[in-house]
Image: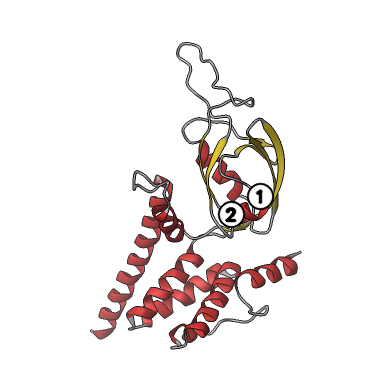
């Protein structure tokens, strides 16, 4: 099973064989195509061996004097830093309609509880698009887990999806108009926080211009980690010169 998963990851992100390490120096190649291939191979390596990749990419970053090289390494470091999780490729919002598409009647003092999440964006080239998910669909169930909750319902759904590794098939129960349908989705690899932020900020659905709090915190966490590593390296360098 492990070998099959590794082969799938290689096909998805690069072409390295088992046990092979990518040549990080190829990121500086003047040929764009060769540089892109090298980056895809390194992403595959960082996805499969994050601890080893994080250490080597960080050292390469600290040793590199070239600003362009450092920019490329930051993106790869971010991939190694964050755990690999499953990904569908949608933007959601809470949906408060019942299973028949009606607004529920509330008793005094009751609060709306979401009974699904409505899909407001399906990213092109993602597992969501490949499986047939459409804008306007309402996800009611993921495998055996029913989609219910309050203001954090979309975060709960994201966490439920992301607890599964890439290439895992999941079952979705969806309301499309008045029809209830079942779909199978084979998960992809969740993009790193900065990629997701750029995608959100570029979408027409980001009317507020504010990133979700969880995403903003992840971006800040990575930046603080990298800043501390740079400061530590500079202190060690200064101490070595004394």
Left or right for 127, reference 33: right
Q: Position of residue 31 (x, y in %)?
A: 47, 87
Left or right for 20, reference 93: right
Seen as rendered, the residue at the extreme bottom is: 30
The C terminus sits in image quarter: bottom left
Q: Residue at 49% across / 71% down in the picture? A: 54
Q: Tell me the residue that label 2 is attached to.
A: 87
Q: Residues within 10 Å of mark 1 (few under 14, many from 20)?
A: few
Does 149 sit above or below residue 125? above
Tag nearer the camera, 2 or 1: 1
Seen as rendered, the residue at the extreme front is: 177
Q: Position of residue 189 (x, y in %)?
A: 59, 60
Does 235 sit above or below residue 178? below
- Secondary structure, mark 2, is strand
Q: Residue at 36% across / 79% down in the picture? A: 68
Seen as rendered, the residue at the extreme left is: 242
What is the distance, in whole Å, between disc 2 and disc 1 at their CAs?
15 Å
The N terminus sits in image quarter: bottom right
Residue nearest the observer in this picture, 224 or 126: 126
Lower position in the chain sequence, tag 2 or tag 1: 2
Q: Tell me the residue that label 1 is attached to.
A: 132
Q: Residue at 37% across / 82% down in the picture? A: 63
Does 178 sit above or below residue 133? above
Q: Quick check: marks 2 and 1 in contact, CB under 8 Å?
A: no
The quarter of the picture where residue 17 lies is bottom right
Q: Position of residue 229 (x, y in %)?
A: 36, 69
Q: Position of residue 111 (x, y in %)?
A: 47, 21
Does 192 sit above or below residue 233? above
The quarter of the picture where residue 193 lies is bottom left
- Secondary structure, mark 1, is loop
């Amino acid at each position: 099973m492990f070998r099959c998963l590794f082969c799938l990851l290689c096909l998805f992100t690069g072409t390295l064989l088992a046990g092979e390490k990518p040549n990080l120096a190829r990121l500086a190649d003047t040929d764009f195509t060769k540089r892109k291939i090298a980056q895809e191979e390194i992403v595959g390596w960082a996805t499969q061996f994050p601890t080893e990749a994080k250490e080597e990419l960080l050292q390469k970053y600290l040793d590199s004097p070239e600003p362009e090289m450092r920019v490329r390494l930051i993106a790869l470091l971010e991939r190694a830093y964050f755990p690999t999780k499953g990904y569908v490729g949608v933007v959601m919002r809470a949906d408060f309609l019942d299973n028949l598409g009606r607004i529920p009647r509330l008793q005094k003092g009751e609060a709306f509880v979401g009974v699904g999440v409505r899909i407001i964006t399906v990213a092109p080239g993602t597992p969501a698009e490949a499986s047939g998910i459409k804008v306007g669909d309402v996800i009611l169930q993921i495998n055996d887990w029913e989609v219910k909750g309050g203001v954090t319902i979309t975060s709960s759904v994201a966490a439920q999806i992301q607890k599964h590794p890439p290439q895992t098939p999941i079952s979705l129960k969806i309301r499309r108009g008045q029809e209830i349908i079942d779909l199978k989705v084979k998960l992809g690899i969740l993009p790193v926080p900065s990629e997701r932020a750029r995608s959100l900020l570029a979408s027409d659905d980001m009317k507020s211009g504010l990133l979700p709090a969880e995403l903003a915190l992840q971006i800040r966490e990575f930046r603080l980690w990298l800043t501390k590593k740079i400061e530590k390296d500079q202190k060690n360098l200064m101490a070595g010169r004394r």
